[in-house]
């Protein structure tokens, strides 16, 4: 027991200790004036004074310096007692059966620490395993929601334009272009009559509105197998079904043939619907048909599809010459591997590009060979587009654009609109939203932020990236880009549609300049040498 005075471990011999019983009796007598009687006993080899029973005082038989602690009661000189310090409580007697040993106490303390540590560990594990992930998920959810709100504000100022959608071809294959009971404003993904019980359906009006789509290029596509047969008729029928579909939903959609009309539709909250012709074989090798397609509303022409035309080489040529392999075969295309016939573009092919410049029709280089890309970029006065392609450096597919071409886009002013087809994203069957971002960032790094856009290819692709399954998911892509400090709000506007609108305006400006310069239409016919007797449906001799 401690009273604040130093102790020593040296014990004094008994003979050196004199107990003055008279003094003790005096103390006993003098303390009788205190308000509380005391008695003195000995516990644990030390003097202790207790209340009650002050008639008995028992000194220790073998005292030590520890036993002679300062007396807790002191006479104050006038016959009164004063307490210096309160007495500590007596020690508790040891429990039966438990030895009072230091090792046992240490063992008990160790067990207590172990129990406390285990409880703390379990609480920490519970927090890290459940509480922290929930907190992070909640924070991530709130951050995603905040980014989506930012994207919504961005797209309220600038249109989101997608460069390629194959819905019209599905209308032909599944409904023979009959629209009388086609409910484009319903959930087509859940309609077994439309998707045949599968999950390939990626486009309908509700999902487009959810995806904040402001403008869509609908593809007027005819398979390569129709070349030299009825490709022109098929193309005209596809343009017809696109126009009729838009006219069926006038409150949600409107036809657009210019950049200004895209912006006007965006202001009134409608989806601007534009037409792109996919495949030069749709011309029937006729510049007159090209002009008619423009008059019907077509605003870009893809120079080839998965086949050479009599005047341009397709990307399949590169698969033969560069050793690239076809990753997937289009069921509508012939399994033939074409070889280069024109070193890119023939003389007639160059006339096609020049006439497109004069008309104000954008030159689309998706699906063409590298030499065709190079030749077209040398001939054209207007910026080119790649309506649905990617970066070949990310996925080594001939359908993607090599760095040698990307590096020239800034001088040409063109744009690559990134496809969402898995086989063009990472050359595998499965891909994710981040693969799309990898292509976007690579094109930006090579060509600049002014030369990249979006051209998913929905309803014409069966393998879509996780997180970008249909047209409703565009905001998720832009929200993910918003996490990157390199992507400002203005940059996202350019990617979403601003770059395409700029290219279209520049194409229109060049058309207007050529019109003011009174550049006449090209009236040449393709040579029989170019046709190489491949045409089956041409009136002979004229």
Image (tube, grey):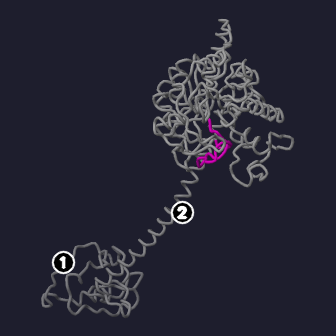
Give the alpha-carbon distance from disc 1 to disc 2, as whole Å. Answer: 57 Å
Q: Position of residue 357 (x, y in %)?
A: 63, 17
Q: Is residue 8 positioned above or below 208 on the image?
A: below
Label 1 vs 2, first from the N-terminus: 1
Residue at image location 46% in from the left, 36% down from the top: 322
Judged left or right of residue 75, residue 249 is right
Q: Which mark is residue 130?
A: 2
Magenta stretch encompasses residue 93: no
Give the main secondary structure, helix, strand or loop, of the magenta stretch: loop
Magenta extent: 454-473
Q: Nearer the viewer, residue 103 or 283?
A: 283
Q: Position of residue 192 (x, y in %)?
A: 77, 53
Left or right side of 150 for 51:
left
For the residue pair 414 and 519, the one nearer the viewer reads as: 519
Residue corresponding to mark 1? 8
Would residue 454 be seen by someone viewing this image from the given angle? no
């Amino acid at each position: 027991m401690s009273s604040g005075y130093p102790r020593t471990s040296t014990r004094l011999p008994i003979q050196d200790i004199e107990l003055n019983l008279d003094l003790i009796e005096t103390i006993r007598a003098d303390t009788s004036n205190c308000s509380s009687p005391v008695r003195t006993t000995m516990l644990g080899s030390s003097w202790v004074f207790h209340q009650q029973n002050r008639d008995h005082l028992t000194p220790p038989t073998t005292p030590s310096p520890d036993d002679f602690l300062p007396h807790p009661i002191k006479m104050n000189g006038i016959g009164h007692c004063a307490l210096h310090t309160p007495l500590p409580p007596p020690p508790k007697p040891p429990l039966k059966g438990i030895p009072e040993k230091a090792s046992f106490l240490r063992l008990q303390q160790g067990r207590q620490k172990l129990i406390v540590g285990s409880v703390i560990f379990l609480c920490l594990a519970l927090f890290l395993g459940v509480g922290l992930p929930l907190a992070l998920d909640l924070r991530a959810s709130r951050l995603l929601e905040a980014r989506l709100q930012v994207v919504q504000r961005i797209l309220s100022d600038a249109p989101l334009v997608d460069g390629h959608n194959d819905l019209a071809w599905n209308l032909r294959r599944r409904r023979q272009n009959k629209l009388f009971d086609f409910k484009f404003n319903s959930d087509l993904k859940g309609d077994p009559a439309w998707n045949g019980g599968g999950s390939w359906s990626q486009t309908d009006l509700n999902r487009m509105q959810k995806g904040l789509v402001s403008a869509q290029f609908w593809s007027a596509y005819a398979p390569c197998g129709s070349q030299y047969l009825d490709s022109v008729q098929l193309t005209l029928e596809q343009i017809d079904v696109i126009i009729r579909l838009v006219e069926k939903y006038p409150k949600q959609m409107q036809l657009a043939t210019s950049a200004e009309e895209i912006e006007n539709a965006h202001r009134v909250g409608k989806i601007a619907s534009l037409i792109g012709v996919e495949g030069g074989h749709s011309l029937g090798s006729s510049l007159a048909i090209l002009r008619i397609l423009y008059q019907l509303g077509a605003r870009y022409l893809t120079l080839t599809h998965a086949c050479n035309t009599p005047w341009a080489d397709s990307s399949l040529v590169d698969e033969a010459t560069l050793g690239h392999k076809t990753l997937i075969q289009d069921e509508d295309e012939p399994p033939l591997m074409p070889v280069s016939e024109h070193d890119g573009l023939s003389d007639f092919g160059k006339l096609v590009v020049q006439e497109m410049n004069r008309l104000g029709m954008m030159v689309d280089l998706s699906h063409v060979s590298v030499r065709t890309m190079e030749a077209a970029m040398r001939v054209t006065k207007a910026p080119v587009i790649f309506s649905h392609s990617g970066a070949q450096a990310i996925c080594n597919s001939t359908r993607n654009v090599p760095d040698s071409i990307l590096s020239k886009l800034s001088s040409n002013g063109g744009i690559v609109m990134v496809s969402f087809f898995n086989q063009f994203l990472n050359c595998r069957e499965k891909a994710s939203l981040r693969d799309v971002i990898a292509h976007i960032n690579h094109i930006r790094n090579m060509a600049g932020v002014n030369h990249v856009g979006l051209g998913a290819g929905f309803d014409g692709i069966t393998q879509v990236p996780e997180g970008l399954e249909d047209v409703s998911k565009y905001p998720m892509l832009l929200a993910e880009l918003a996490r990157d400090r390199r992507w400002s709000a203005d940059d996202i506007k350019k990617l979403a549609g601003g770059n395409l609108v700029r290219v279209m305006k520049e194409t229109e400006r060049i058309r207007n300049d050529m019109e003011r310069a009174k550049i006449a239409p090209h009236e040449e016919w393709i040579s029989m040498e170019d046709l190489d007797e491949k045409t089956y449906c041409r009136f002979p001799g004229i």
